Amino acid sequence: MKKLINDVETMLSESLDGFAAAHADIVALGEAGQFVRRRTPKPGKVALISGGGSGHEPLHTGFVGHGMLDAACPGQIFTSPTPDQMLAAAQSVETGAGVLFIVKNYSGDMMNFQMAAEMVDCDNETVVVNDDVAVENSTYTTGRRGVAGTLIVEKILGAAAERGDPLRKLKQLGDAVNKATASMGVALTSCTVPAAGKPTFQIGGDEMEMGVGIHGEPGRRRIKLAGADDIAHELTGAILKDLSLKAGQQVLLLVNGFGGTPMLELYLMVNAVHKVLAGHQVKVARHLTGSYVTSLEMAGCSVTVSALDDAQLALWDAPVHTAALRWGM
Amino acid sequence: MKKLINDVETMLSESLDGFAAAHADIVALGEAGQFVRRRTPKPGKVALISGGGSGHEPLHTGFVGHGMLDAACPGQIFTSPTPDQMLAAAQSVETGAGVLFIVKNYSGDMMNFQMAAEMVDCDNETVVVNDDVAVENSTYTTGRRGVAGTLIVEKILGAAAERGDPLRKLKQLGDAVNKATASMGVALTSCTVPAAGKPTFQIGGDEMEMGVGIHGEPGRRRIKLAGADDIAHELTGAILKDLSLKAGQQVLLLVNGFGGTPMLELYLMVNAVHKVLAGHQVKVARHLTGSYVTSLEMAGCSVTVSALDDAQLALWDAPVHTAALRWGM
């Protein structure tokens, strides 16, 4: 296992310390690294809290700040944070307008966020993200997995919360954006969880895992390595089928790297996906390209398409200032 | 070789097409992909032009836009662009105030940019970046290599050009920032150049290349994989020795991933480097953390320290709007 670390046991806390130091203008670290919170809370707005296992950075800590999350709870690598972490985060950032939890659909996260929701003594709602169209049910989940579309839900809800939308309205908006968003990914290599010390799965030098999950969970099938156009066709085809897009529909396209994929390849995939979308008369109104929802150092990418209306696109465009996404300020 | 591509021959042009589509609000692609230019030129400002072999993305194309480069010329992977590309870029973006070329110190780039400088029929200067303290002379260069510090030179010159600084003043500023900037890197794995189809170098499962170049060139020595603190100590120690920093000096710290390194590890390295700098009473005034000057999918990182004065820090802070760096707008 080749990683830039000192000790598997302290890896997460050392990384959080570095993150908090590098972004001290935006975030503050909760006691014992239980959560990362927005440095300057905005009184009266609904507090948005997310979290999940670490190893997917910049998700979620990199999305804490103005116009996005108020707090993120990092679990150990690929392990849900505890309800105590979520409760501590809620107590730290809630200012009277309630808490909205944004949860990726994995059994551990769902259970722990539900416990946290029962423990907090304020008004709260939960938006569950399950954008991965690759498979129903999987290693860590019942139903579809929540993957890269999560950042789109977090960005749009963050902008709506920032302008003062109330809790129930945010819950409806989050559910609507989740429903309009679909993703699917492919892995060329495995990741290695530090505590395990060996690759999560074995894969041949000429194979890829089509429909892989962001923890290296199995996808639809293991096939021979294909060209980028073929990969784009399969990923985008599955997404288009799920969303039932009409010709002329405008979308946000996110081509996301899993951590070990060069930008050169991600932009090549953007080009390949464009060709597929153009063939269906789908118009790409916004782009995001980069490694935003990762699986440690796994090579591969996912494609996310989000069919947003004008009001939702305006929320996407609204100013944001976090470690990983920043524009308009 | 596992990459998201269709064909080695068309890889670069397909990727540039995807890049131009994803960032059509910021950039435009020159004819036959010879260069990427700022979409909206600013008449009367000095035109900043950089470029180099591809495979280091987002450097340089990702730094084209308001407050940074006016054009970037992408060569084939790890191969210098041609003088013709640079000339075409200059003719496209020069508006009467002259051209400043920003060149990383590699023999091919130096020769071709010098030829371009002789061919352009406008006032021009060249700033050479050679921030890598690992070795004197190397596989592709005489003298020190230009590595991640290049983006700091490009950002600060970009801000100065945007406010209207004249050519000679920019040349002086660029030389000064280069002199104040030092870098050193370490590789845990090799990259694979697509046209070669096999790893650039062989490295054992328990080894690392200390002082590696951004094309996988040899560094100072091949040693056993060490902990992050030991690595930070060696990289930062070499940089501090080169810059002869005094206690109390304020610096910009760039921890840069080479393409295959998770953010979790990069932030852990930030934390490790902080400890070394604190031991020398060096104050980190600004941070940048991420994979900005890469070597395809190579795992590893570099540390760059830039000893900037208040005026230079203000230029770093000035608004920028490019694909890879954006703030203040």
Image: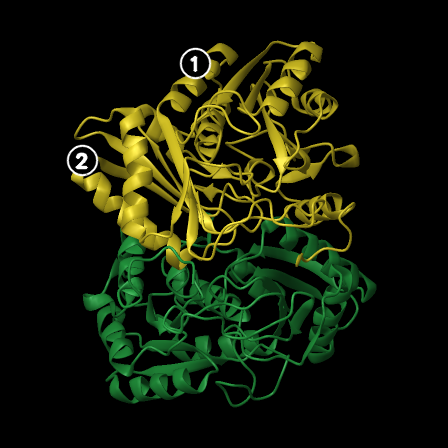
Chain colours: A green, B yellow
Report the amino acid beneath label 2.
His
The residue located at (63%, 19%) in the rendering is: B113
Identify the disc placed on residue B90: none
Comparing marks 1 and 2, which lies closer to the viewer? 2
Give the image location of residue A158, x and y in percent: 43, 65
Q: Position of residue A93 (x, y in %)?
A: 26, 68
Q: Is residue B106 left or right of residue B35?
A: left
Residue A41 or residue A272, whichever sits in front: A272
Task: State the quadrant of the N terminus of chain B.
Answer: bottom right
Residue B172 badge: 1
User: Looking at the picture, does residue A92 appear above or below residue B203?
Assistant: below
Q: Is residue A12 above or below residue A84?
A: above
**Is residue A55 among what the camera can see?**
yes
Residue at 33% x, 57% y is A5
Asked if the residue under mark 2 is in contact with the one under mark 1, i.e. CB atoms within 8 Å, the reply is no
Left or right of residue B121: residue A254: left
Q: CA distance from mark 1 to mark 2?
A: 29 Å
The amino acid beneath tag 1 is Gln
Mark 2: few/some/many CA within 10 Å (<14, 14-19, 20+)? some
> Whole-percent x and y of residue B194?
69, 48
Q: Chain of mark 1?
A: B
The furthest residue to the right: A279
Disc number for residue B280: 2
Number of disc labels: 2
Secondary structure beneath dot 1 equals: helix
- Looking at the image, residue A282 sits to the left or right of residue A66; the answer is right
- In this rendered view, identify the residue nearer to me: B197 or B80: B197
What residue is rendered at 34% in x and 42% in y? Answer: B287
SS class, disc 2: loop
Residue found 46% across the figure and 53% down from its top: A319
